[in-house]
């Protein structure tokens, strides 16, 4: 039976303190539902509104990529430095400690290996399983201009519909085929299509010319992929330029886990992303930590 004896009169109404109605700071996300915003806050730091996502999902089409042969050995020690981990459900269940309590962005599309036409992907995860795994977002590859362009976009829109049902944001990952030009015009097209069709945020590649226009014309946050391994200073410069030109973070894989000193590198990347540290200074930090 409820304890109803001696109930005190409620009187702490703080009549002098107006109720705050603060906007949600993340670009283009103010009208989302609470669950979506809560999940996005597990990806984007609520103070900087930026993120360092550690991408280790390459095995879903490439198999045991250099640096990811043993995720338990090479990646688990990096987890304390990542805001978010991007991986497949196979790696999540088999290798990532369930005590990892930051955001997980789950790879949710797949199908072809590097031996086949990569754009021929399908949805590879049921949204109920994503919810069971308590993920912060689901990621889907979108091949604008690719052979299976419509199919990949349809994968995304189906995931967006399912994600909206459960409050799970969808990350649209713009994939560039070997034959496609990686310029601002293409990136504007691909990122805008993802955002228009419902992605909560979009991953793209950094381009030297005109990246500001890619970020400006995308109404939701953009994160950049690291791409192929670069010298550490160059990777830090790329991250810095992207952030200064409007990106909300990085989703970086090879430039961290294939670095000579991955733990030092991810810490240097964090400074560039969250603290606007100049790349040369971050590189000094990298060398000290290394
Ligand atoms: C694979 C991906 C990867 O997560 C992405 O490419 C990021 O990794 P990297 O920084 O190594 O490019 O989406 O399709």
Image (tube, rainbow, N blue to C red):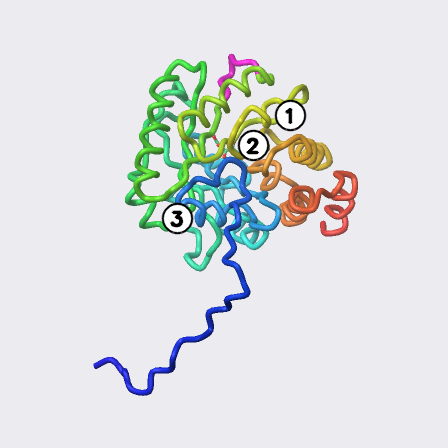
Q: Distance from label 3 to label 1 (Cα)?
A: 30 Å
Q: Distance from label 1 to label 2 (Cα)?
A: 16 Å
The answer to whether residue 73 of the structure is visible from this angle is yes
Q: Is residue 1 left or right of residue 132?
A: left
Position in image of residue 247 (x %, y %): 61, 33
| Residue annotated with mark 2 | 225
| Residue annotated with mark 3 | 35
Marked residue nearer the N-terminal end (2 or 3): 3
Magenta stretch bounds: 176-181
- Describe the element under mark 3 as helix, strand or loop: helix
For image coordinates 51% across by 39% down, the residue present is 55
Instruction: Using the image, determine if residue 13 lies above or below residue 28.
Output: below
Decide: marks 1, 2 in contact (CB < 8 A)? no
For image coordinates 34% across by 27% down, the residue present is 155
Position in image of residue 159 (x %, y %): 34, 33
Most extreme residue toward the left, as rendered? 1
Mark 2 vs ligand 1: CB under 8 Å? yes
Is-magenta flag for residue 64? Answer: no
| Residue annotated with mark 1 | 212
Instruction: Using the image, determine if residue 4 lies above or below residue 71.
Output: below
| Nearest the eye: 84 or 244 | 244
Q: Quadrant of residue 61?
A: top left
Magenta portion: prevailing SS class: loop
- Describe the element under mark 1 as helix, strand or loop: helix
Instruction: Using the image, determine if residue 7 lies above or below residue 203.
Output: below
The answer to whether residue 230 of the structure is visible from this angle is no
Position in image of residue 72 (x %, y %): 48, 51
- Describe the element under mark 2 as helix, strand or loop: strand
| Nearest the eye: 22 or 68 | 22
């Amino acid at each position: 039976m409820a304890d109803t004896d001696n109930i005190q009169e409620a009187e702490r109404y703080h009549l002098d303190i107006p109720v705050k109605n603060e906007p949600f700071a993340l670009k283009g996300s103010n009208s989302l539902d609470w669950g979506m915003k809560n999940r996005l806050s597990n990806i984007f730091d609520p103070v900087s509104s930026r993120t360092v996502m550690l991408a280790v999902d390459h095995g879903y089409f490439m198999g045991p990529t250099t640096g990811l042969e043993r995720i338990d050995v090479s990646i688990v020690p990096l987890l304390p430095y990542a805001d978010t981990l991007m991986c497949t459900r196979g790696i999540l269940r088999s290798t990532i400690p369930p005590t990892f309590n930051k955001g997980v962005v789950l790879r949710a599309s797949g199908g072809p290996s590097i031996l086949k036409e990569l754009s021929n992907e399908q949805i590879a995860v049921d949204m109920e399983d994503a919810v069971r795994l308590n993920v912060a977002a689901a990621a889907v590859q979108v091949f604008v201009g690719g052979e299976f362009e419509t199919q990949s976009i349809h994968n995304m829109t189906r995931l967006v519909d399912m994600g909206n049902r459960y409050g799970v944001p969808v990350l649209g990952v713009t994939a560039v085929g070997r034959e496609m030009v990686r310029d601002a015009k293409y990136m504007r097209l691909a990122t805008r299509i993802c955002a228009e069709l419902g992605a909560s945020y979009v991953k793209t590649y950094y381009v030297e010319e005109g990246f500001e226009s890619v970020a400006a014309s995308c109404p939701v946050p953009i994160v950049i992929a690291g791409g192929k391994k670069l010298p550490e200073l160059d990777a830090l410069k790329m991250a810095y330029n992207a952030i200064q030109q409007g990106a909300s973070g990085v989703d970086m894989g090879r430039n961290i886990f294939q670095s000579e000193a991955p733990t030092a590198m991810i810490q240097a990347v964090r400074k560039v992303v969250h603290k606007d540290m100049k790349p040369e200074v971050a590189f000094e930090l990298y060398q000290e930590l290394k």
